[in-house]
Image (tube, rainbow, N blue to C red):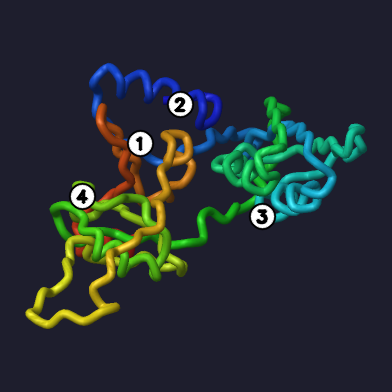
Amino acid sequence: MAGRGELQMGVLIENMRREGFELSISRPQVLFREENGQRLEPIEEVTIDVDDEYSGAVIEKITGARKGELVEMRPAGAGKTRIIAHVPSRGLIGYHGEFLTDTRGTGVLNRVFHGWAPHKGPIPGRRAGVLISMENGQAVAYALWNLEERGRMFIGPQTDVYQGMIIGEHSRENDLEVNPLKGKKLTNVRASGSDDAVRLTPHVQFSLEEAIAYIDDDELVEVTPNAIRLRKRYLDPHERKRMAKST
């Protein structure tokens, strides 16, 4: 399926989901073109209106790892700055949510196709690893509470999980297999302070577009009429290791 960015694809997938379809979606890929033996990629002209205090963070993001080129920057009045840049379409995948965070929701970003340009080299993706369920069943609040120090959660208690499903983001760069079903061992001994109620940090809930932008190349978004889940392409851990070695 070809489309213009995550939003357009998200609209089609959401319509299919509401009609009862179940499907898995991989990370969006940009279409390249070959001319005279040279690989070309699409470039978009991005126009950004942002508060002056956030302009530095925005410029750093689009001209740094995302390989964009700053074309124009000028005051737009009322404490706003207008930034125009030419950025590879690859660099804009997943950037919108990050842009809203950097500008505290006050920035406005418009993008339009500009032309084709020589391939600008690799663009780094997500740096953090993920937390992967190693069991099938229902997540337990006590287990999620113990896992909070490992990273942020994508699910809440009593959520149905399965082996290979992504349940959170790891605080480090590697993926980690965890057991969200592990309950507290019960004994006859009770002590004040050790039996407090479990208080969980609210988990992250992705929209469909955010989930599509978040996943890595070896991951999928699983879409059903009742849920949107993240999972590894290969659910079995041994198969994941074997495929990682082959690549």
Q: How many neighbours does mark 1 have within 10 angstroms: few (below 14), some (14-19), or many (20 or more)?
A: some
Three-letter amino acid code of the residue under disc 2? Met
Marks 1 and 2: in contact by CB < 8 Å? yes
Q: Earlier in the sequence, mark 4 or mark 2?
A: 2
Q: Indicate which disc, 3 or 1, sits on the residue closer to the N terminus.
A: 1
Badge 4: few (under 14), some or many (20 or more) residues near its Cα, within 10 Å? few
Q: Mark 3 or mark 4, which is nearer to you?
A: 4
Say what secondary structure mark 1 lies in. Answer: strand
Mark 3 / mark 4, whichever is N-terminal: 3
Q: Which residue is mark 2?
A: 9
Dot 3: few (<14), some (14–19), or many (≥20) neighbours within 10 Å? Answer: few
Return the disc, 4 or 1, that comes first in the chain's sequence: 1
What residue occupies the far front of the structure in this picture?
192
Above-or-below relation of 121 to 115: below
- How far apart are the two marked residues, 3 and 1, measured between alpha carbons? 25 Å
Residue that carries the numbered disc 3 in the rendered image: 65
Kind of residue at badge 3 = Ala
Amino acid on which disc 1 is placed: Ile
Please indicate, yes or no, whether residue 239 appears anywhere in the rendered image: no
From the image, tell me which residue sits under label 4.
158
- CA gap between label 2 and label 1 equals 10 Å
Q: Quadrant of residue 99?
A: top right
Q: Position of residue 24 (x, y in %)?
A: 30, 36
- Location of the C terminus (image quadrant): bottom left
Q: Earlier in the sequence, mark 2 or mark 1?
A: 2
Q: Position of residue 85 (x, y in %)?
A: 78, 38
Check disc 1 and report the residue beneath it.
Answer: 25
